[in-house]
Amino acid sequence: MGWIYATLLSALCLGLYDLSTKHAVRENAVLPVLFFANVCSATIWLSVMLLDRSGASVPALFHVAPLTWTQHAQLALKSVMVGSSWMCTYFAIKHLPLSIASPIRSTGPMWTLFGAVLVLGERPSGLEYLGVAITLASFVGLSFAGAREGIHFHRNKWIAWLVAGTLLGSCSGLYDRFLLHNRGYNAATVQAWFSVYLALFFLPLVLGWKFRLWQRNEFHWRWSILLVSLGLLAADFLYFNALREPDAMIALVSSMRRGSTLVAFAGGIFLFGEKNIWKKLPAALGILTGIVITLLG
C-alpha cells in the first residue's frame, strides 16, 4: 500500500508544479524557463552525488549508483523523451487556460493504460476500461466548454501541442516502468541522471534563443522557476519510488497521479482568475471520476 500513498503525495506536488509552471511561463520566454528549472534540479542532484562520492553520510534513499555507458545512454534517452514532452506542454500551457490544459494533460493515464496493455501485458479490469470511457467522454465535453472561449480543439495548434506532449509523457511513463522494474534502477539514480541530461538537452536550444536564431520572447527571471524545479523533484522522486514497488501497476500509478488536476484547476480559479469555470467543471470532474473508477478497478 505504500506505493498508493507515495503516488497521492506525488499528485499533490505535481499540482503545485503545474501552478508554478503557469506562473513562470506567462508572458515569458519558455526555453529559458525550461533550461533554468532543469539547471536547478541538476545542481541539487550533482551536489548530492558529490557528497556521496566524498564519503559524507548520505541517506541510502538518495544514493546514486555508478552506471555503465549503456545505462547512461538509457537515461539519456529518457531525458530526450521528457524534454520533447515538456517543450510541447510548456508552450501549450503558456497559451491555454490552466483549466483547459490541466484536464487534457490528465488524460495521460488513459494512453499509458493502452500502452501497458499492448507493451507490458498488463490486464485492466472492466471497471478500468469504464474509467477510460468516461475520461474520453469528459474530454469531448471539455472541448465544447473550450469552444466557448474561442479554443476549438480541432484547429487550435496549442491543443495539438498539448496532446503531443501528453502522448510523449505517456511513453515516458512506460519507459519508467521498464527502467525501474525490469532494469532495476533505483529512483535516485534515474532522477539524478535524467535531470543532468535534461539540462544538457535544453542547453543548445536556450543558446539558440540567446543568440536570436529565431523570433522569440524576452525572458524574465521569476522565483516560480525555482518552485517548478522543487515541485517536480518531489513529485518525480515519490513517483519513481512508487513504481519500484513490485505490485504497483503503471496504469494505476499514472491515473492516481493525475489527481493533480484538482490542485491545478483550483489554482486556475483563485490565482489566475480564469473564466467559464462552471462550464468546464463537469468535464474536469468527469475526467477525475474516470481516474477514480480506473483506480477502483
Image (cartoon, helix red, strand yellow):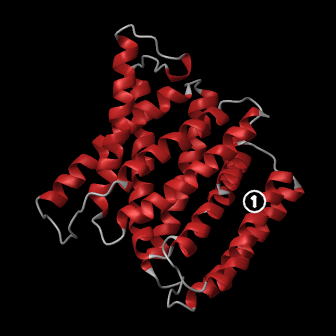
Q: Nearer the viewer, residue 243 or 41?
A: 41
Q: Where is residue 45 in the image (x, y as percent from the top left)?
A: 39, 30
Q: What residue type is labelled 1?
A: Ile
In the image, is 128 to the left or to the right of 89? right
Q: Where is residue 178 in the image (x, y as percent from the top left)?
A: 60, 35
Q: Quadrant of the N terminus?
A: top right
**Residue 292, visible in the rendered structure:** yes
**Residue 74, visible in the rendered structure:** no
Position above or below: 202 against 137: above
Question: Across the whole image, how many numbered discs are drawn on residues?
Answer: 1
Return the residue at label 1: 291
Q: Residue furthest top?
A: 55
Residue 247 falls in image quadrant: top right
Position above or below: 193 against 231: above
- Helix, strand or loop for disc 1: helix
In the image, is 261 to the left or to the right of 151? right
Q: Which residue is drawn at 69% across and 46% down?
A: 8
Q: Which residue is drawn at 42% across and 40% down?
A: 77
Q: Where is residue 262 in the image (x, y as percent from the top left)?
A: 65, 63
Position above or below: 2 against 221: above
Q: Which residue is drawn at 46% across and 76% down?
A: 96
In the image, is 30 to the left or to the right of 234? left
Residue 135 falls in image quadrant: bottom right
